[in-house]
Amino acid sequence: MRGLIVPSFYKNMVFKEKINSLLLEALSERPSLFLIDVVITDAFKVIVTIDGDNGVVLQDCIDVSRAVESNLDREEQDFSLEVASFGVGGPLKFIRQYKKNVGRTLIVKTATENIEAELVEANDDFVILAWEAREPKKIGKGKETVQKRLELSYGDIKEAIVTVTF
C-alpha cells in the first residue's frame, strides 16, 4: 500500500493558514497588540512582526510565540518561529500605527515631495502634519520661517517612517 503524496504547495498553504489562525487567536487575547506581518519561508521559518498601541515588550513576544508554538506539532511539520516587535525605521503600514505615533516626527513620502513633520493628528481617514519651513519673504529680500500644516489622506502617503531624535 502506498502512502498519499501531498504536494508541497498544499502543505505550505495549510501550514500558513494554521499559523494565521493561531496568531489571530493569540492576538485576540491581547487587544492592545496587532499583527504587522507574517513571513513563512520555503524552509518553514516563520517570522512574525507585531506592534502594540502602547508598544511591545519582550514578554508580549514570548507570549505570542508560546501561543503559536504550543499548538503546532513539529512531528507533523518542522519549523522555526521568530516573533519580534515592529522596529524603529520601518514604514508604517496601518492606521493604528499612525494613531499611536501622534506627537512624533515622521518622514512622509508622497508622489510629489518628502516632508519631515510632526504627526499632529491621525484619524480613520487622514493625518495632519505640521512643520516649519524657510520660504522667501512676501515683501523684501531674504527668507522667513513659516508654519506649515497639511491634511493628507492615507492614500496619498507612499511611505511614512517615524524618526528617532536623540
Image (cartoon, grey):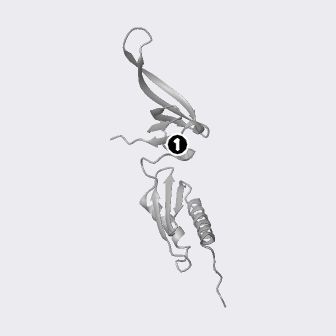
Question: Is residue 84 toward the left or the right of residue 38 in the image?
Answer: left
Which one is in front, 109 or 21? 109
Where in the figure is residue 100, as x and y percent of width and height?
50, 44
Q: Residue at x 42, y 60 (%)?
A: 58
Q: Is residue 19 visible?
A: yes
Q: Is residue 23 above or below residue 134?
A: below
Q: Is any part of residue 103 visible from this angle? A: no
Q: How many marks?
A: 1
Quadrant showing the N terminus: bottom right
In the rendered image, residue 142, in percent from the top left (x then y), is placed at 36, 14
Identify the residue at the far left of this view.
Answer: 166
x and y, in percent, of residue 2 in the image: 65, 88
Q: Residue at x 53, y 29 (%)?
A: 150
Please give the name of the residue rendered at 47% of the width and 30% of the height, measured from the top-left corner: 130
Residue extending furthest top? 140
Q: Residue furthest bottom?
A: 1
Residue at 50% from the left image edge and 32% from the top image edge: 129
Nearer-the-camera pick, 108 or 120: 108
- When the figure is inspected, residue 83 is found, relative to residue 71, above or below; the finding is above
For the C terminus, the image quarter is: top left
Amino acid carrying mark 1 in the image: Tyr
| Residue 162 point in image, percent of width and height | 44, 42
Quadrant position of residue 123: top right
Q: Secondary structure at mark 1?
A: helix
Q: Nearer the viewer, residue 27 or 6?
A: 6
Q: 10 Å neighbourhood of mark 1: few (<14), some, or many (≥20)?
A: many
- Residue for badge 1: 98
Q: Quadrant of residue 105?
A: top left
Q: Is residue 119 above or below residue 48?
A: above
